[in-house]
Image: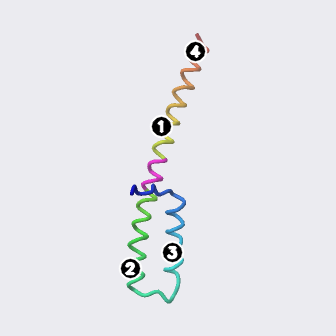
Amino acid sequence: MPKKKENYEDLFKQLETIVQDMDEDNISLDSSMKNYEKGIELTNKLYKILSEAEGKIKIIDKNQEEKLFEDDEDERI
């Protein structure tokens, strides 16, 4: 069965839940370590998603800027 693509919002909610769990005083050391590892894993995935989005935005901006200059040059001719 294909793996469902994870989205930013769902991953962030998972991370928030882990943070809330770790803020509780009655969590065991073992649970804290597991939560910490999962939190780092989620943080890395979130960072990757944000980096990919930033790259796409830069491409879009560059394309729009080039189009703007092309349109400006066309108007001068």
Q: Residue at x 43, y 65 (%)?
A: 42
Q: Position of residue 21 (x, y in %)?
A: 51, 79
**Kind of residue indicated by mark 3:** Val
Q: Position of residue 24 (x, y in %)?
A: 53, 84
On-image quarter of the C terminus: top right
**Kind of residue indicated by mark 2:** Met
- Between the C-alphas of marks 3 and 1, the distance is 34 Å
The label shown at residue 27 is none
Mark 2, secondary structure of its residue: helix
**Kind of residue indicated by mark 1:** Ile
The mark nearer the N terminus, 1 or 2, is 2
The mark nearer the N terminus, 4 or 3, is 3
Q: Which residues are magenta?
A: 48-53
On-image quarter of the N terminus: bottom left
The mark nearer the N terminus, 2 or 4, is 2
**Kind of residue indicated by mark 4:** Asp
| In magenta segment, residue 7 | no
Identify the residue position indicated by label 2 in the image.
Answer: 33
For the residues carrying marks 2 and 4, which lies nearer the camera in this image?
2
The answer to whether 41 is drawn above or below residue 28 in the figure is above
In the visual, does 66 lie left or right of 41?
Answer: right
Q: Residue 70 appears in which quarter of the rendering?
A: top right
Q: Residue at x 53, y 70 (%)?
A: 16
Q: Residue at x 53, y 36 (%)?
A: 61
- Between the C-alphas of marks 2 and 4, the distance is 61 Å
Mark 4, secondary structure of its residue: helix
